Image: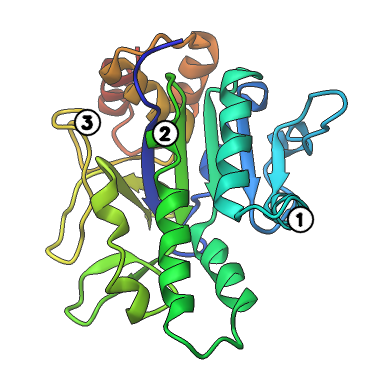
Amino acid sequence: MSDNICEKVLIEAYTGSGKTYSIMNIDPEKAMLIQIIPKRLTFPEGINWKPWNGETKTGSTMSVSRLRETAVKNKLSFAQVLKSFVNNMITEHKKEIIIIDDLVYVMTQSFMKNINDKSYDKWNELAAEITQVLTIADQIQGDARLYYLTHPEEDANGKLKMKTAGKLVDNLVTPEGMFNTVIGAAVKDGKHWFKVGSTHSSENYKCPMGLFKEDLIPSDLEDFDTAMCQRLGIEKVVDEEKLLARIKNNNTNNKKAHEKRIVEAYI
């Protein structure tokens, strides 16, 4: 196992911008999708994403409610149980990609748990839990990548930021500051894209310098992950046949230029 700590990426996207759809090309055998709401994945490959079975040690999805039940049963915090589960998936079951979808609802569930608490302590507790959830990757050794999917919102100055449970949490936590990589999602000309660079003063997106030549790339988390692995020096087996098929089927206006960019970035 690598001596490095796991890499983490924050993906901020509005509902309908394709952030969940972007996982379509990821191999579920190598990934774990932790869902706040255990909903069916609607893309064709979604049938291959099965709930985790603790007895057979198979599956690629886990609901947050199951993790919270484990936390209550064992008198542990949710963050402790989540960290233990993620660590187990990476170290024991060789999952290379962990996806948490999505952080807004993690906070909502935690907030609702203490909704009748009128003291300021509940905000400190919520901020502490979110910080612990966001720093899980910092405490696990290996070459795995953690992708946090969440929703954005505008602050009082019109700047986009991760949506939280309110200003009191904002005063205690700045999620974007905990990440080297923060990207967005957008729909343009009827297609889904990742925003890997800031094109407007209201945006706060950032990627490792020079990782991509353009600010918009196709919304495909598998290809994004492959590019990240190449930059980080992580060995990743890429199914080049499937990759080239995706390039061929991409319907951009400038197909040849698009193919050149993808091949340069991902192979």
* Viewer-side residue, 250 vs 193: 193
| Residue under pointer 3 | 212
Residue 15, position in %: x, y? 50, 64
Above or below: residue 28 compared with residue 118: above
* Viewer-side residue, 245 vs 125: 125
Q: Nearer the viewer, mark 2 or mark 3?
A: 2
| Secondary structure of residue under mark 1 | helix
Query: Local crowd at mark 2 within 10 Å, few (<14), some, or many (≥20)?
Result: few
- The amino acid on which the numbered mark 2 sits, given as a three-letter code, is Gln
> From this viewpoint, which residue is outermost toward the front?
75
- CA–CA distance in space, label 2 to label 1: 23 Å
Residue 114, position in %: x, y? 60, 78
* Viewer-side residue, 241 vs 150: 150
Give the residue at x 26% y 16%: 264
- CA–CA distance in space, label 1 to label 3: 41 Å
Residue 10, position in %: x, y? 37, 47
Above or below: residue 191 compared with residue 170: above
- The amino acid on which the numbered mark 3 sits, given as a three-letter code, is Phe
Query: Local crowd at mark 3 within 10 Å, few (<14), some, or many (≥20)?
Result: some
Q: Earlier in the sequence, mark 1 or mark 3?
A: 1
- CA–CA distance in space, label 2 to label 3: 28 Å
* Viewer-side residue, 68 vs 14: 68
| Secondary structure of residue under mark 2 | helix
